[in-house]
Amino acid sequence: MRILYVHAGNMYGGTERVLETLARERSARPALEPRFALCFDGRLAARLRATGVAVDTLGPARITRPHLAMQARSRLARIIQRDLPDVVVTQSPWSHAIFASVARRFELPLVLWTHDLLSGRPYLERLAKRWTPDLVICNSQCTESAARAIYPWTPTEIVHGPLSFVARSTHGHVRAQSATAVESVVIVHVGRMVPLKGHFALLDALAELHVEEKWTCWFVGGAQDERERQYERALRQRVAVLKLDECVRFLGERTDVPDVLAEADIYCQPNAAAEAFGLSLVEALGAGLPVLATELGGAREIVTPSCGRLVAPASREALVDALAWLVQDSTARRALASAGPARAWSLCNAPARLAQLEGCFERVAGNVAA
């Protein structure tokens, strides 16, 4: 089956990691032939092409510029006529609002794979509601519940994002590059520079972390637009105000995140609001790290008492206590870490998730044909 994934492609985060994994792990399900149509030719397009898959660019479509949207739709129509895909999959309300009509024009099976919590209120979601998909794929139970606000009667399927888990050995090069002592307990946070990810909550908790053990915190992730650059500058200013300069490191955008995780000791991401799922949490579990997160959204479906801890939202005291416990108790860290890889594999291993997707696409194609 030829599956055409339609996406913006201008940013790189969890959704984009999922698409890259689909491309890299496609040999696990040879019957699925992934193809990609992206509006922006950037980091995602380059990483997809490096796997050898077909990637077409549609042009910088804009909802606010109808002529650009029309041009992008015309390009997608030509791609569909050329490649004859069996299923078209949009990856967000934005791509669905712009491109669903093209799939419908060709009477193709249409799937919306949502990676965010929908409410039906934003303008883009109201536009997307005009085109009912044949199936909504949701990355978590909370995402599925939220999707009912837009598509109350559409069939849904929960498919956690597929990930590749590669064992890494610790060589110490990340600690050396970041001037982190070998004996330091490393707390790591991986995520985009956006308020949702809870950077400020973690910094405020670190300022109250009074333990004898030496610790260091790594923030991994780089700003991708001006708003994120402003946010990162505010974070750095907060580090200075809290006098955390000697123990907080900004590692920036990394292509070796598995190596970074392999050299850390604790993963902490105290989200400020509910997140649809949380691939970074799963990746940390897969790397054998105990995970500390906020009891919100998808984290509640990922982190169990066997592999980490969830703390109450906006409870600085609870976050400080949990951090202090994990920094000081190496035995507890090892016990939680030992359960992480199996938990991550059960949630997101690529072969199983690709098999699940194949079943979804076969059912959708069969129902539309019937």
Image: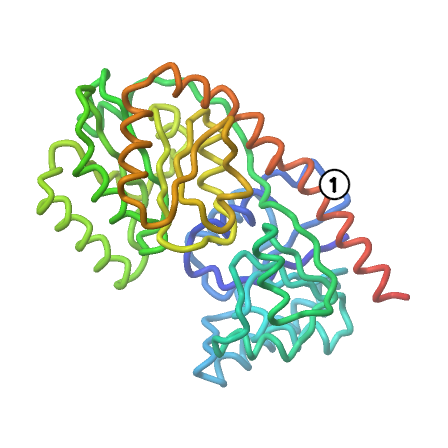
In front: 59, or 144?
A: 144
- Residue at 41% across, 57% down: 11
Q: Is residue 279 above or below residue 62?
A: above
Q: Position of residue 152 (x, y in %)?
A: 68, 69
Q: Residues within 10 Å of mark 1 (few under 14, many from 20)?
A: few
Q: Quadrant of residue 245?
A: top left
Residue at the image point whose x is 34% and y is 23% from the top: 263
Residue 85 vs 131, above or below: the answer is: above
Type of amino acid at the residue the image marks with label 1: Pro
The spot of residue 75 in percent (x, y) is 59, 73
User: For the C terminus, which image quadrant?
Assistant: bottom right
Q: Is residue 334 left or right of residue 57?
A: left
Residue at x-position 67% and y-position 35%: 351
Find residue 326 and report its horizontal and vertical position in percent.
Answer: 33, 25
Q: Is residue 23 visible?
A: no
Q: Nearer the viewer, residue 189 or 28?
A: 189
Q: Secondary structure at mark 1?
A: loop
- On the image, numbered disc 1 is attached to which residue? 30
Extreme residue in the right direction: 370
Task: Decide if residue 32 is on the left or right side of residue 350.
Answer: right
